[in-house]
Each structure stands twice: as C-alpha cells, then as structure tokens.
Amino acid sequence: MNATGKPRRWRRIVSVGVLTTFILGVLSMAVFDMALKWTNRENFCISCHVMEDNVYREYQNTIHYANRSGVRAVCADCHVPKEFLPKMIRKVQAAGEVWHAILGSIDTPEKFEAKRPQLAQREWRRMKANDSRECRNCHDAASFDYSVQGYRATARHMESLSSGQTCIDCHKGIAHKLPPIDQGIGVTSPDDITLDVFRPAAEKKPEAQED
C-alpha cells in the first residue's frame, strides 16, 4: 500500500458496493415474492367485477368453496402453478387476460357467456398439457382410499388411471358452469353404468332415528 492509502480506500468502496448490492437483491426478491403472493389472493382475483359477478358466484356453490371438512381451494390453487417457472409463465398469460378485461372484451355477462367456450377450452388444454398439476396439489391418486369411494367413482378412477387420463378429462364442471359444448354426458361403461363424470352424486343425509 502506498502512502496515500488508496488501495485500502478502494477495498472499502468495493466492500460497501458488494454489501449494498446484496441487500438490495434480498429486498428486491422479498418484494417480488410478496407481489406474487398478493396477486394470488382470492380478494385480488375477484377485485375485477368480471370475475366476481360471473365465475366467482358459480364457484361459491361448489364443493371447492364449502364442504364438510372446511378445506377451500381458492382461485390460485387451481389456476396458478406452484413451481417457479410455470408460475411465471402463467403470470405473463394472466397479464394478457387482464388487458382484455380492461379493453372490455368480457365486461358484461353477455360478453362473458359468449366467450365462455373459448376461455374454458383454453384452460382445459392448459390443464391437460400439465397432467392436471394444480389438481394434484391436493388430490393424489396414489392416496385414494377406494374403500370409502362409491362403486362408480372407484371404477371410473381405476379406468382413467389405467388409460392415462388426467383429472380434467372428467372433472371439467367441478368449479364453474360448463359452456354449451358436447362433453359426452350420458356415456356408459362396458357394464352399462352411467358415469358421474363431472361431479359426485349428492350425499344422502342420514335418516333421523326414531325413539
């Protein structure tokens, strides 16, 4: 080091610069993570009246909203992947969807219904392509307890697993109203048993016991 002390001064500047960059990087990642979580909230999703007045009202009448166990799947659980890269891709796609909402493409119930088949099929294709990844975050076929499933559900699940089908192949109407597209309702199995392909039959309430 020379008498002026310049090397020591430069080391101090570099150290401060590295520390500042690290702190800013950590803060940026924290803010980014908070933004992702904030935009995944149910309240954020339905802040757009198009969502609140249409698909959200449908969803409130389904088992994913209210059920005996109290476990609720919110919008992001079904429509936003948890893995980082797929999540980023989905966020970019969602930005385009928000832009169309701003433009007024689906700003009335009539416009939304006219677009429903196109929107639904696009989401079905996405879920089909990723093997119903978001469904499997909660529903794991390897953990099915067939002893408590009905005959038709057991037969259908076993058939779908052996044929390589995925959740969305059968459960398209589980959270939102189906668009007027032929889904093969009424098809039967080889044993001539009508398949409950969209939602399970309503559970029968136990009859009151007489004194």
Image: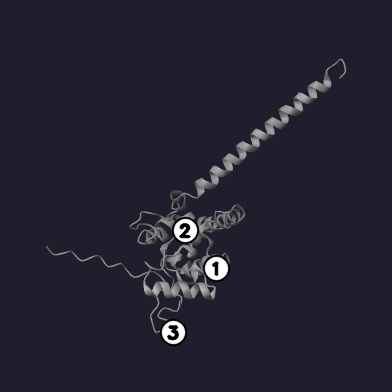
| Residue 76 image offset from top left, x and y in percent | 49, 54
Question: In this picture, is 103 found above or below 172?
Answer: above
Q: Tell me if mark 3 has few (under 14), some (14-19) or many (20+) residues whose alpha carbon lies within 10 angstroms of its own.
A: few
Q: Nearer the viewer, residue 98 or 128?
A: 128
Give the position of the N terminus as an image quadrant: top right
| Residue 84 image offset from top left, x and y in percent | 60, 52
Circle 2 sits in a helix, a strand or a loop, which is it? loop
Tag in front: 1 or 2 = 2
Snapshot quadrant of residue 145: bottom left
Question: In this picture, is 191 found above or below 23?
Answer: below
Give the position of the C terminus as an image quadrant: bottom left
Three-letter residue code for mark 1: Lys
Circles 2 and 3 in contact, beta carbons < 8 Å: no
Q: Which residue is mark 2?
A: 138
Q: Nearer the viewer, residue 98 or 39?
A: 39
CA gap, disc 2 to disc 3?
A: 30 Å
Question: In this picture, is 196 found above or below 53?
Answer: below
Counting residues from the start of the chain, the first of labels 2 and 3 encountered is 2
Q: Which residue is mark 3?
A: 190
Question: Residue at horizontal 60%, vertical 56%?
Answer: 86
Counting residues from the start of the chain, the first of labels 3 and 1 encountered is 1
Numbered mark located on residue 128 in the image? 1
Q: Tell me if mark 2 has few (under 14), some (14-19) or many (20+) residues whose alpha carbon lies within 10 angstroms of its own.
A: few
Q: Nearer the viewer, residue 92 or 201?
A: 201
Circles 1 and 2 in contact, beta carbons < 8 Å: no
